[in-house]
Image (cartoon, grey):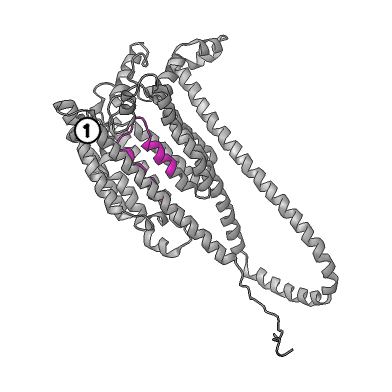
Amino acid sequence: MILQFSLILLGILLRVAGYHFDLSSFYNQKFEYVTPFTSFDNLIEAVHLMSHGTSPYGGSHFHLPPIYLWLFRWVDQDSYSNWGLRIIFILIDLICCLLLFLIIKQTLLQQKNKMLKQKLERILPVAISSIYFLNPFTITSCLVYCMGNFTRLYILLSIYFAMNANLVLTTFVLSLAAYTEVTPVLLIIPMILYCIKQRSQLFKSKLNISKLNINKNQEKEKEKEQKQKEEKEEKQKKVKKNQKQKKEKKTKQNNNKEKQQNNSKIYLQWFFGLFLFFFWWALLLILSQLMFNSNITNIKTLTKDPNFFQHFFSNSHYFTFLKHTYYFLLNITDLTPNIGLYWYLLTETFVVFRQFLVFTLQFINVVGLIPLTLRFHSYPLFLLAIITSSITILKAYPTLADFPFLFCLLVMQPKLLENTRYRTFFIRGFQVVIGLLSPFYKIWIQDGTGNANYLFGISLSFSFAEILVLMEMIRSAMIVITNEKDKKKEKNSKPYYISTPNKKLHSKKDK
């Protein structure tokens, strides 16, 4: 506990020191941490335009939903030195760190292997949470006021609520993540799977606790009753032989009914979870339209208006809001250089084939969702980590702050770390690639001695290294699954004996 508190204090002090020495103005111009979607300067400009009565989506800079305009309506150009804003972003990182600690601790408690529990229960939660909180990439994203921190917070909150089997809060928080970015919609399937699994485990644990809390006096009375019953049963053995067959038939029928009821309950949970998610998302969109249609103070007067629905749908800003947020992320209109791969591929392709390429790149995650869920449906937390990592790798506007978040999600289950290979190779490779990103950008943009192939080559190697890590984790997960299946087969298999007939073999001569 003291170690965790000291590490948290150190992370807060590093962020406060970065703000004190004004490092945010230096890192605010770095392309590794600032993208057209996550830029805080774009939000300041949008708030300034909104205060003067013009549309914040009139230009091509601001791409966040309207609720963020209402949350940060007090922001101005001098807000970089405002300690209220700094405390908000420090608190976001601190909550993410604590959520990672709690999630990993609960996953370790659910482990059946006691040796792993004793070894990793003290070390692993503190290590992974400190890797995220003390990472230089997360610290710089906090200094730059990266708006991508909100999506990471929403995803971790949804995982925590799903671990506690709270379907309402998981869907609500995940709808907030899908409201800011479209791609977290794909996480609804593993989240509902995780909620269903945790709910069944909680129900089993409650039953076990209730059985253990039976009094000793009741057990003694039961033992006496059992002795009396045994004496009676010896007399009634002949009568019960005929009744056993009838009971077996009834039990089979009851088991089939119970299975059908359980399946119907699971289907209801799926339907309820999907309905809640899309309900929250639609509610957020309607709220954003109301905020965008007029000021938040005039919503009461709008609802009393008899022509409310006409004003609601007739406003042209409704279409610009969707165009500049979701359509911008899916169509990838802004091609400023970043860590991702889309900016180079789309600049090099012909205009005729641009829409086809964009559709195929965005559809990769949707296609991969079906086989992954079929293979890892019994391991929903790992499935969630795979889908989030694939989303971050194939993101249109990624940042370096996404990398530690991806690493922490993949390392949540300690069983997978035992079967991984090439650990030192991956560590050294990431160090070299990340170190060469800013020099190659400077050679091309500032000095003018290179070209776009420098930056694209190093960003391609960075994404390729991330894909290799993901493939290695999937391989180790497959090994763990096969080992568990083999153990179950060994337990269920009964010993058998080869019986040979006791007959003497006679030869023709004896005959």
**Front-lying residue, 56 or 426:** 426
**Front-lying residue, 135 or 32:** 32
Instruction: Kindly identify which residue carries mark 1.
Output: 454
Of all residues, the one furthest to the bottom in this rendering is 510
Please state the horizontal and vertical placement of residue 279, each as a whole percent of the image: 55, 29
Q: Is residue 332 magenta?
A: no
Please state the horizontal and vertical placement of residue 217, each as a whole percent of the image: 65, 70
Amino acid type of the residue that numbered disc 1 sits on in the rendered structure: Tyr
- The N terminus is located in which quarter? bottom left
Q: Is residue 408 magenta?
A: yes
Residue occupying image coordinates x 43% and y 39%: 155
- The C terminus is located in which quarter? bottom right
Tell me where residue 95 sits by quadrant: top left
**Front-lying residue, 304 or 410:** 410
Residue range in magenta is 386-413
Tell me where residue 445 sits by quadrant: top left
Tell me where residue 230 sits by quadrant: bottom right
Chief secondary structure of the magenta span? helix
Image vertical order of residue 507 relative to residue 250, above or below: below
Residue occupying image coordinates x 42% and y 19%: 323
